[in-house]
Image (tube, grey):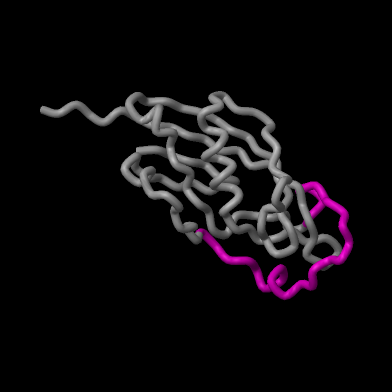
Amino acid sequence: MTMLRVAETIAVFSLAHCAAPVPAPVRIETCSAEVSGAPASTDSTIYQWWEATPAPNATAVVIPQYPAKLAHRPNTARVVLLAVVDTAGRIEPGSIQLESASDTAFVAPSVFAVTHSVFCPGLYAGRRVRVRIRIPMHYSAHAAPAGP
């Protein structure tokens, strides 16, 4: 089994699920009425996650594919991305930055997953705003138990 932690949300999947070409997002929660009903800001300012109340949070995540070249051996990795969530709850194209990666083989699947995930946008002064977030992703694959 592989465990992924996305913005403090945990999803578990087996390596067999990694073969799917474009996995569908897994819905994990919905936006509050406060955020859903708030008007979008027309300001181009990008706020930091700690300035938004509430800060953006994932509402539907795409589980990243475990790198095929590593499927034959157990491996753990941590990737930390920075990205801007727009007023509609999508990651802005071109905004993803790599903060750190313990193994570069996990960067591309992490970027793909974040790009295709959906977020509840952040609020600032009662309006939905663009917010830069930090997304830590943890991967852990364990060898299958030996047969009898």
Where residue 91 sits in the image (x, y, percent)? 67, 53
Q: Specify the quadrant of the image occupied by residue 83.
A: top right
Main SS of the magenta segment? loop
Where residue 15 sits in the image (x, y, percent)? 34, 39
| Residue at 87%, 57% in the rendered image | 44
* Quarter of the image where the C terminus is located: top left
Q: Magenta stretch containing residue 55, yes or no?
A: no
The residue closer to the viewer here, 40 or 97, is 97
* Quarter of the image where the N terminus is located: top left
20 up-or-down from 121: above or below: above
| Residue at 57%, 34% in the rendered image | 107
The residue closer to the viewer here, 20 or 35, is 20
Q: As drawn, is 94 to the left or to the right of 76? A: right
The residue closer to the viewer here, 22 or 89, is 22
| Start-end of magenta stretch | 28-52
Where residue 53 sits in the image (x, y, percent)? 77, 58
| Residue at 69%, 71% in the rendered image | 36
Is residue 133 at all visible to an observer of this figure? no
Number of numbered tags placed on the structure image: 0
Where residue 29 sits in the image (x, y, percent)? 54, 62
Q: As drawn, is 109 to the left or to the right of 127? A: left
Q: As drawn, is 66 to the left or to the right of 123? A: left
Q: Specify the quadrant of the image occupied by residue 96.
A: top right
Is residue 147 at all visible to an observer of this figure? yes
Q: Specify the quadrant of the image occupied by residue 12.
A: top left
